[in-house]
C-alpha cells in the first residue's frame, strides 16, 4: 500500500492507493471478517507478518473502519422482505425522505437512477402488513408511483 498526494480536507482513506494485495485482503474479510490471520496470509500467498502489517495499515488509514457480526433475524422464519421502487416529485424529496424514515418497516433506503428515484427495502410480518405499508408510502405527499416486488430467497449476502 502506498501513500498518494494528500488533498486538503480529504479523509485518510482517500489519501492512500490500494494495491492488488490490499484489495484481495479486503475481499477475504468481506466474506469472513473472523478469518484467522494465518489463513489470510496463506490465501494471499504472503507471510503472516506481511498480512498483519497490511491489515493494520488499512485500519490506520481508515479503509477498514470496523468488523461486524451477522445475526439471524429475530422476526422468525416467515418474515416478508420486499423492494419498493418509488418515483417522487423532486421538490418534495426532503419531506418524502423524512416521512419514509419514520417507517420502521423500511430497513434501507437508496437513491437510484432511472424511472424511479428511491428504492426502499422493507421487512414485514405478513403480506397484509406489506400491503398496508405500501399504501402508506403511496399516500405520502410527493410520491408519484411505486413498483413493488417480494424477495423470495437470499442467494448471496456479503457485507458491503
Image (tube, rainbow, N blue to C red):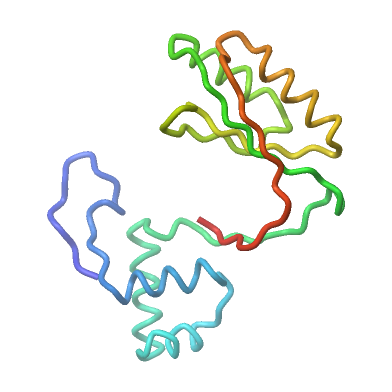
Percent across and percent down for residue 80 are 79, 43
In the image, what residue occupies the spot 17% across and 41% down?
Answer: 8
Counting the numbered discs, the total is 0
Question: Residue 45: image x %, image y %?
Answer: 37, 90
Q: Residue drawn 47% across and 32% down? A: 111
Q: Is 149 left or right of 51, judged from the image as shown?
A: right
**Residue 147 placement, left or right of 80:** left
Q: Where is residue 60, by image quadrant?
A: bottom left
Quarter assignment of residue 31 = bottom right
User: Which is more toward the observer, 47 or 79?
Assistant: 79
Q: Residue at x 63, y 23 (%)?
A: 100
34 up-or-down from 65: above or below: below
x and y, in percent, of residue 35 in the image? 56, 78
From the viewer's perspective, is 159 left or right of 79?
Answer: left
Q: Quadrant of the N terminus?
A: bottom left
45 versus 11 height, above or below: below
Q: Which one is nearer the viewer's eye here, 69 or 27?
A: 27
Amino acid at each position: 500500500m502506498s501513500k498518494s498526494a494528500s488533498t486538503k480536507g480529504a479523509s485518510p482513506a482517500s489519501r492512500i492507493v490500494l494495491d492488488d494485495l490490499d484489495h484481495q485482503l479486503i475481499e477475504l474479510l468481506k466474506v469472513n471478517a473472523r478469518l484467522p490471520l494465518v489463513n489470510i496470509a496463506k490465501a494471499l500467498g504472503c507471510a503472516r507478518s506481511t498480512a498483519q502489517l497490511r491489515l493494520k495499515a488499512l485500519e490506520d488509514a481508515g479503509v477498514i473502519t470496523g468488523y461486524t457480526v451477522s445475526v439471524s433475524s429475530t422476526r422468525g422464519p416467515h418474515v416478508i422482505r420486499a423492494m419498493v421502487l418509488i418515483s417522487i416529485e423532486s421538490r418534495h424529496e426532503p419531506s418524502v425522505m423524512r416521512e419514509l424514515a419514520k417507517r420502521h418497516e423500511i430497513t434501507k433506503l437508496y437513491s437510484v437512477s432511472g424511472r424511479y428515484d428511491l428504492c426502499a427495502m422493507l421487512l414485514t410480518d405478513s403480506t397484509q402488513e406489506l400491503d398496508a405499508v405500501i399504501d402508506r408510502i403511496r399516500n405520502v405527499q410527493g410520491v408519484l408511483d411505486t413498483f413493488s416486488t417480494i424477495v423470495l430467497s437470499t442467494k448471496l449476502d456479503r457485507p458491503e
